[in-house]
């Protein structure tokens, strides 16, 4: 998979006033990796994600495997999980809803049902509820059903715009672990916009930071969160794990500040404490 953004700029026309949302963005996404996009409200994150999904045209070029994302094949290789995807549920049953995408791609009823069942089970959706109306589900279940609808289409690239917003912590963790699993074990490329620096630290392999429609920093999450210049330029918050590591280092210990995944962070703190004794 190769997903490349070249010289992409985008302007909105807001009642005759031109609003520049993206300003000459260049980026090559790493295949099979989890990339996070950070930046303040209005920095252009959602605009970039929408352009990556091929739903809109821009100045410059975005290609997947050499073809424009706006082409039919491009659009089917890259799929977006919108903010509040549950609002897009509309069929009489959950199963039918999830079958809609694969049927649209030309799969026969039987194959579409097979893909839909597989996708629903993979998100942890209870088989008992497959024939329920999506409107009778809880918020978290609706979100899982909507995500299954995307997975059933088997895209190479999954775009996520704030995928856990409004979910309780248990559902949020389940959804994030699912996307991480798809990326780590099924070769999917995942691209996520998130306000949560904790989620980015925990799940992303790469990240970049947008400000005023431009990329102002790009690297691993550990590199970005340890880049004091970048942070003062964006006032992004630090993940809780890095805050903890910094507290420990203020006490005179010397933890490795790149250990920002929860498990690594705990181990690192234990290690430096043990070494000191
Ligand atoms: N439909 C729209 N009409 C006019 N301006 C818009 C529209 N959507 C977004 N913008 C503007 O474009 C810029 C980038 O917005 P957006 O991509 O939504 O940022 P983010 O997702 O980072 O909050 C902002 O200045 C925003 O006000
Ligand atoms: Mg947004």
Image: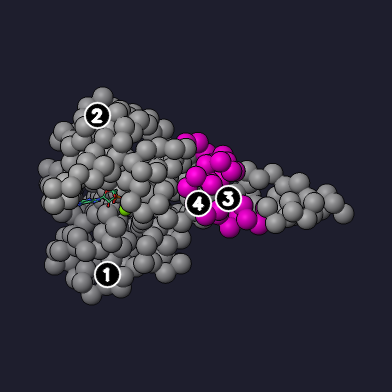
Residue name at image x 46 percent, y 60 percent: 173
Q: Position of residue 196 (x, y in %)?
A: 46, 56
Q: Nearer the viewer, mark 2 or mark 3?
A: 2
- Looking at the rendered structure, the secondary structure element under dot 1 is helix
Residue name at image x 13 percent, y 67 percent: 92
Q: Is residue 188 visible?
A: no
Residue under numbered circle 2 = 61
The reply to whether callout 1 and callout 3 are in contact (CB within 8 Å) is no
Q: In terms of sequence position, does the residue under pointer 2 or pointer 3 come before the other?
A: 2
Q: Which mark is residue 129?
A: 1
Q: In terms of sequence position, does the residue under pointer 4 or pointer 3 come before the other?
A: 4
Q: Check the image and name the residue furthest to the front.
A: 17
Q: In terms of sequence position, does the residue under pointer 1 or pointer 4 come before the other?
A: 1
The reply to whether callout 4 and callout 2 are in contact (CB within 8 Å) is no
Give the Cα separation between the discs numbered 1 and 4. 44 Å
**Few, some or many residues within 10 Å of mark 4 (<14, 14–19, 20+):** few
The reply to whether callout 2 and callout 3 are in contact (CB within 8 Å) is no
Magenta region, residue range: 218-245
Residue under numbered circle 4 = 235
Give the Cα separation between the discs numbered 4 and 3. 21 Å
Q: Magenta stretch: residue 225 in it?
A: yes
Residue under numbered circle 3 = 261
């Amino acid at each position: 998979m190769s997903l490349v953004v070249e010289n992409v700029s985008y302007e909105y026309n807001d009642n005759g006033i031109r609003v520049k949302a993206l300003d000459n963005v260049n980026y090559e996404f790493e295949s099979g990796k989890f990339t996070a996009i950070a930046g303040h409200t209005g920095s252009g994150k959602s605009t970039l994600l929408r352009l990556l999904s091929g739903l809109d045209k821009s100045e410059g070029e975005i290609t997947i495997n050499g073809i424009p994302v706006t082409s039919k094949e491009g659009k089917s290789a890259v799929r977006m999980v919108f903010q509040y995807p549950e609002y897009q549920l509309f069929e009489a049953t959950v199963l039918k809803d999830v079958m809609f995408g694969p049927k649209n791609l030309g799969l026969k009823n039987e194959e579409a049902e097979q893909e839909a069942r597989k996708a629903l089970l993979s998100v942890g959706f209870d088989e008992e509820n497959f024939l329920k109306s999506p409107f009778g589900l809880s918020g978290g279940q609706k979100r899982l059903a909507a995500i299954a609808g995307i997975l059933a289409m088997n895209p190479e690239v999954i775009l996520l715009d704030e995928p856990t917003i409004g979910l309780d912590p248990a559902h949020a963790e389940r959804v994030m672990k699912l996307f991480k699993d798809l990326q780590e074990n099924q070769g999917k490329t995942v691209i996520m916009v998130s306000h949560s620096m904790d989620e980015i630290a925990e799940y992303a392999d790469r990240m970049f930071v947008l400000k005023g429609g431009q990329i102002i920093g790009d690297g691993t999450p550990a590199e970005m969160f340890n880049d004091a210049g970048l942070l003062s330029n964006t006032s992004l918050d630090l993940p809780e794990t890095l805050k903890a590591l910094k507290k420990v280092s203020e006490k005179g210990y010397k933890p490795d500040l790149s250990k920002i995944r929860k498990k690594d962070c705990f181990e690192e703190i234990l290690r430096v404490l043990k070494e000191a004794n």
